Amino acid sequence: MKYLDLTLATVAENLALEEAILQQCENGTLGAEEWVRVWDAHQPFVVIGRSSRLAEEVDLAAAAQMKAPVFRRISGGASIAAGPGCFFYAVFLSLHRRPHLRMIDQAHRFVMEKIAAAVRQLGVEPRVDGHCDLVVGDRKVSGNALRIQRNWLLYHGTLLLSMDLTLIEQLLRHPPREPGYRRGRPHREFLANLGLGRQELAAALCRQWQAEPVQQFSVPQVAVTRLVTTRYNNPRWNAAR
C-alpha cells in the first residue's frame, strides 16, 4: 500500500482528488497498488452526503454568514462540518484483492478496526459504534462513509483532533437519522476531540496500514479540474437535493 500526505489549495480540489484517485484505481492508471491518503481542513466548511437533503441537515444562513462553503461528496452518510483541527483520511482498496469488502458491513468493520487500532497505538481507547462512528467514552470523535465501484472501494472519514466544536453546532442541524447511542443529544454534548497530534496520528495510520510513503506523486490535474468544475464547485451538484 502507498501512503500520500497531501493537502491541495482548496476544499473542492481535495474532494476532487479523492474521486480522481478512485477513478484512476478503477481504470488501472495507478496499477494494482492500494492507497491511503491524509489531508487537513484549513477553513470552516460543510460536506454533505450524496443523498443528503441540504436544507434539512445544514443551517444555510449560518454557513453563508460564516462564509463556510458547502459541498456534496460522492459517498453516503450524513453531513459533517469541518475546520482547522479536523483531520481527513481516505483509503482506496482493491475488491479483487479483498472481495469480502463488497459486503458493506464487512467493509465498515474492516476499515474501522484499522482506524481504531491506529488511535489505540497513541494511548486512546476507542470503540466502533453506530454503523461507522469511532467513539471514546460516549462521545463521537470520527465519522466515516464509503463508495463502492466495480473493482475498488473508497472509504473515507474525519478524525476530530483539536477542532472548535462550536462550528459544528452552528453549521449543522440535528441530523434526521442518528445512532442509538446518541440518545438525542445536541452536537455539543455528543462530539469530542481526540486531543492527539496530527503528525503522530498520521504516522500511526501509516504504520497500521503498513503503507509506504510515496516519494513523488503526480496530481491528476486534468481530472481534478474537471471534477471541481462539474461537481464540487458546481451549485447544481452541491444543491441537488
Image (spheres, rainbow, N blue to C red):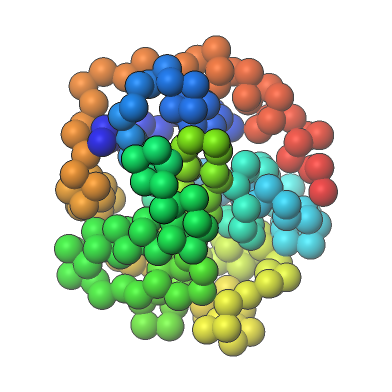
Q: Quarter-wise, where is residue 125 in the image?
A: bottom left
Residue 77 visible in image: yes
Considering only vertical position in the picture, is 27 above or below 209? above
Find residue 239 and report its horizontal and vertical position in percent: 79, 43
Find residue 12 and report its horizontal and vertical position in percent: 58, 32
Q: Residue furthest bottom?
A: 183
- The N terminus appears in which quarter of the rendering? top left
Q: Residue at x 62, y 53 (%)?
A: 76
Residue 188 visible in image: no
Q: Quarter-wise, where is residue 55 in the image?
A: bottom right
- Position of 94 compared to 240: left or right? left
Q: Residue at x 24, y 63 (%)?
A: 117
- Position of 98 compared to 188: left or right? left
Considering only vertical position in the picture, is 141 above or below 82? below
Find residue 192 and report its horizontal and vertical position in percent: 43, 71
Q: Residue at x 51, y 74 (%)?
A: 130
Q: Residue furthest top?
A: 222
Q: Residue at x 40, y 38 (%)?
A: 96
Q: Nearer the viewer, residue 108 or 241?
A: 108
Q: Quarter-wise, where is residue 124 in the image?
A: bottom left
Find residue 139 and report its horizontal and vertical position in percent: 44, 77
Tally of numbered tags: 0
